[in-house]
Amino acid sequence: MVEVLSQIDVINGIFTLGMVIVNTAVGAVLIWKSRKTKSRPLLAMGIALILLVSPWFTNSINFLLIISNLPSLTPELHLAMSLVPLPIANFAWMVMITDLLLKKRQKSILIIYFAYAVFFNVVVLTLLSIDSTLVGTFDSPIDTVYSSLISGLILVLLMTVQVNSLLFFVRSRRAESPEARLKATFFLISTTTFVVASILDSRATFEGVAFIIIIRFLLLLGAIEIYWAFLLPDYVKKVFIRSKI
């Protein structure tokens, strides 16, 4: 069945699509740069950044299908495409963190996060096979409201990102290099921006255009800040280091 979008759905879809394009582009650049520098942390971060926006990527696909007068994704496929990549992104994130900070304990840490990824997806796929509403319902044709259980599982992933980003920031701020400290600052700001925007997005009912724009802008800003954290452009370096920020 072809669905009809309201005006606010169209605005939401346009801004979501724009945010997904920017995040995917930044992730792709990081992956491409990793091939030149042979940097596994850079590769892992690029993969994580692309997969972390899977819920919005799926919403964008639905948006494009609907405005093209094509049938939208089934609830089961929509939810699976949104959620299954998330713990994989989290695992890639931990590969990056442990490569940089926790190399000695990397194996045991990654085993734990691999196990959580398997647990997460087993729960999601099992519930979807029973009843998709146990995983989430649709607030609009292009937006999902997750169940309390799934929201809790996602919150664990978000807190992993935030806590490890704080750890990375604290350790990196001890560096003598102003550039290293600046990168650490951008890294913490970017992850905090992403986590806060993700939580706000999950609580939103999308009754206000301004709220949609603010959330999408924050998510887009988070991707740009991640780029600065790993591939600090000279013009940014000059502005912030000169200002001693």
Image (spheres, rainbow, N blue to C red):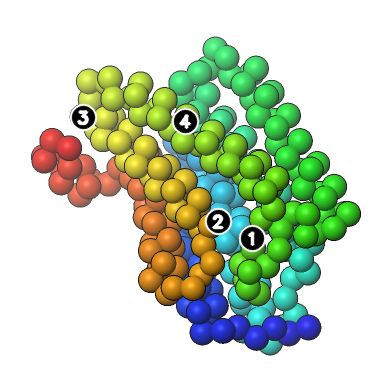
Query: Is there a contact, CB below 8 Å, between mark 2 and mark 1?
Result: yes
Q: Amino acid at mark 2?
A: Ser
From the image, state whether disc 2 or disc 4 is nearer to you. 2
Query: Is there a contact, CB below 8 Å, between mark 4 and mark 1?
Result: no
Quadrant location of the N terminus in the rendered image: bottom right
Q: Mark 3 or mark 1, which is nearer the start of the sequence? A: 1
The image shows residue 32, relative to residue 131, as above or below, that is: above
From the image, state whether disc 4 or disc 1 is nearer to you. 1
- Left or right? Give the position of 66 relative to 196: right
Which residue is located at x 11 percent, y 40 percent?
243
Q: Mark 3 or mark 4, which is nearer the start of the sequence? A: 4
Q: Mark 4 or mark 2, which is nearer the start of the sequence? A: 4
The residues bearing labels 1 and 3 have C-alpha atoms spaced at a distance of 42 Å
Which residue is located at x 79 percent, y 43 percent?
123
From the image, state whether disc 3 or disc 2 is nearer to you. 2
- Left or right? Give the position of 96 relative to 193: right
Q: Amino acid at mark 4?
A: Val
- Left or right? Give the position of 174 relative to 13: left
The residue that label 1 is drawn on is 145
Which residue is located at x 57 percent, y 14 percent?
105
Q: Secondary structure at mark 2?
A: helix
Which residue is located at x 70 percent, y 45 percent?
149
User: At which x and y percent is residue 3?
Assistant: 70, 83
Mark number, residue 178: 3
Mark number, residue 202: 2
The residue that label 4 is drawn on is 163
Q: Secondary structure at mark 1?
A: strand
Q: Amino acid at mark 1?
A: Val
